[in-house]
């Protein structure tokens, strides 16, 4: 991993964003725990996505002749454990959801075949393309022939661990959505086109997890499945791709760091009629953070076939019954969080003026969008040894705490405290000083402009709240 990445990893650990899982036992297979700031940031990303999906109205009103008053997307939280039949129908238990594994005959390290022969990383069902083996990247030893390695994580339900009780942890969240297509359609009295959004954990027994939280065996996905008429699927695909790119731009990802890559047919998931990967330019290189797929009728057709249920949509108007096409947008929470961290991480050499006159070292500034920043406000008494100022600051902290994620900090010089805040992306720093005691005003410092404004304490909640609207 590059220097930049190790700096980000170290910041994430030092400041309570991300810890290695089971650390006191030496860690555990590329699993991570999200600390107090990590969980706030994750929740903010999930909220930004959820709101975008379920609360937006259409920005475009002219889509393939379909004009809708509102974007109709409802939520779902399906179980992680499902009948193993689901995974037969979806194709995950067959060779489709498998990577090709090669082992070095000399050092016995294992690799994903596609990773060491180069090229784009594979996608579900597109995994496992065979290419000519090369030598071991570690010791140049001879590699074994590739063999299929299924990525589904097995588990047992009930007290007897036999084949009858075996099932799997879900490898993607969307299957729960397909199974509930009819339930949601009927209970919410929806008409096509509409969407179902879900956020939840997924599990894949990845051969080569790594690069911090980029590829882990347990991760979270935010997936939206858009059910539409087959003839409008192409237009919807374009629509959703654009919407998804805008979502990232809107939350601070720079245009030059994001690209949409059309996946050629031979590399596509076999259900996918079209697939575009949204890639972010990580310090490690361009890597996928989200997939937009036209899954056609693949999923509903197969679940209908395997379950015997009629999963067709009947249009009241035309009397037509058909399998809707599905446009899927699928993003990893952890992976996008990593991208947001990389985008925000800034090193300021020589320091930012007010804080570091005497300090020569590099200052870190986390320029996270204010909606994603884990801590919105820091409350600081100018000095620690004046009880009146400290008490006032504590009062202001109590006032703000029910409204924003806040931190109270009285340790060290005010400059140092600003720096500590900048490092975790604190959006506003509120300082109580001598003037506060005279006129009940505080200074509000903006992280990005470093401008300070005097605000009356009774206006502070509204003043800060206003900027988050
Ligand atoms: P990759 O090619 O990187 O293995 P994929 O194409 O298999 O990913 P999808 O099945 O399309 O990924 O999943 C959608 C999203 O879920 C990905 O864009 C990514 O953000 C996230 N994701 C998938 N696998 C992992 C993983 N092992 N760890 C973290 N996030 C993941």
Image: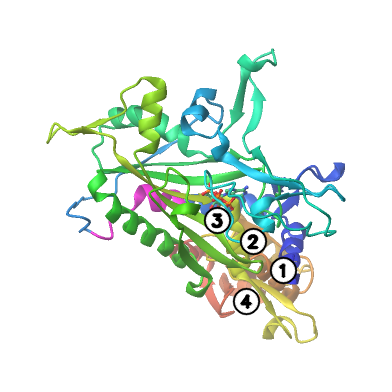
Q: Does residue 387 appear left or right of residue 307 in this picture?
A: right
The reply to whether residue 394 is in sight is: no
Label 1 to label 2: alpha-carbon separation: 41 Å
Pointer 2: what residue? 118
Quarter of the picture holding the C terminus: bottom left
The tag earlier along the polypeptide, 2 or 4, is 2
Is 193 or 45 nearer to us in this picture? 193
The answer to the question of whether label 4 and label 3 lie on touching residues, with beta carbons closer than 8 A, is no
- The residue at 75%/79% (across/down) is 362
Pointer 4: what residue? 435
202 vs 115: above or below: above
Quadrant of the rendered image containing residue 265: bottom left
Label 3 to label 2: alpha-carbon separation: 46 Å
- Beta carbon at label 2 within 8 Å of ligand 1: no
The answer to the question of whether label 3 and label 2 lie on touching residues, with beta carbons closer than 8 A, is no
- The residue at 79%/81% (across/down) is 361
The reply to whether residue 103 is in sight is: yes
Element marked by disc 1: helix
Q: Comparing marks 2 and 4, which lies closer to the viewer?
A: 2
Q: Which residues are magenta?
A: 49-60
Whole-percent x, y for residue 429 in the image: 61, 69
Whole-percent x, y for residue 438 in the image: 60, 74
Pointer 1: what residue? 420
Q: Comparing marks 1 and 2, which lies closer to the viewer?
A: 2
Reply yes or no: does residue 269 show up in magenta.
no
Is 342 or 415 nearer to us in this picture? 342
Indicate which disc residue 180 carries.
none
The answer to the question of whether label 2 and label 4 lie on touching residues, with beta carbons closer than 8 A, is no
Reply yes or no: does residue 56 show up in magenta.
yes
């Amino acid at each position: 991993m590059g220097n930049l990445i190790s700096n980000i990893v170290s910041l994430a650990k030092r400041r309570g964003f991300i810890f290695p899982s089971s650390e006191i036992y030496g860690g555990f297979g590329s699993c991570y725990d999200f600390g107090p700031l990590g969980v706030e940031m994750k929740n903010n990303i999930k909220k930004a996505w959820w709101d975008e999906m379920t609360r937006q109205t259409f920005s475009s009103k002219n889509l393939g002749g379909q004009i809708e008053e509102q974007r109709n997307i409802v939520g779902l939280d399906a179980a992680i454990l499902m009948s193993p039949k689901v995974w037969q129908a979806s194709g995950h238990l067959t060779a489709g959801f498998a990577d090709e594994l090669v082992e070095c005959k000399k050092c016995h390290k294992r690799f994903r075949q596609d990773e060491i022969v180069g090229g784009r990383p594979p996608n579900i069902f597109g995994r496992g393309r065979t290419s000519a083996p090369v030598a071991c990247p570690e010791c140049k030893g001879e590699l074994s022939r590739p063999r299929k390695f299924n990525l589904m994580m097995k588990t047992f339900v009930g007290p007897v661990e036999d084949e009858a009780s075996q099932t799997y942890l879900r490898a993607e969240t969307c299957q729960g959505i397909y199974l509930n297509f009819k339930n949601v359609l009927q209970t919410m009295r929806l008409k096509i086109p509409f969407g179902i959004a879900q956020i939840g954990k997924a599990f894949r027994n990845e051969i080569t997890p790594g690069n911090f939280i980029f590829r882990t065996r347990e991760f979270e996905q935010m997936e939206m499945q858009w059910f539409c008429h087959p003839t409008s699927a192409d237009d919807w695909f374009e629509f959703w791709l654009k919407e998804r790119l805008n979502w990232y731009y809107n939350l601070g990802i720079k245009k030059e760091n994001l690209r949409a890559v059309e996946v050629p047919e031979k590399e596509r998931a076999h259900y996918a009629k079209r697939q575009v990967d949204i890639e972010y330019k990580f310090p490690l290189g361009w890597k996928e953070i989200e997939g937009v797929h036209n899954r056609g009728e693949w999923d509903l057709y197969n679940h209908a076939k395997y379950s015997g249920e009629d999963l067709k949509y009947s249009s009241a108007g035309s009397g037509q019954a058909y399998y809707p096409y599905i446009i899927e947008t699928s993003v990893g929470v952890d992976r996008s969080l990593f991208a947001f961290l990389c985008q925000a991480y800034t090193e300021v050499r020589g320091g930012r003026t007010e804080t570091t006159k005497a300090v020569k070292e590099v200052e870190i500034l986390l320029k996270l969008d204010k909606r994603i920043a884990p801590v919105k406000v820091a409350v600081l008494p100018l000095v620690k040894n004046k009880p009146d100022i400290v008490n006032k600051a504590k009062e202001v902290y109590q006032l703000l705490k029910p409204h924003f994620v806040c931190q109270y900090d009285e340790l060290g010089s005010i400059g140092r405290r600003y720096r500590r805040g900048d490092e975790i992306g604190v959006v506003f720093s509120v300082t109580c000083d001598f003037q506060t005691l005279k006129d009940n005003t505080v200074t509000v410092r903006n992280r990005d402009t470093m401008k300070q404004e005097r605000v009356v304490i009774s206006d502070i909640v509204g003043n800060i709240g206003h900027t988050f609207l």
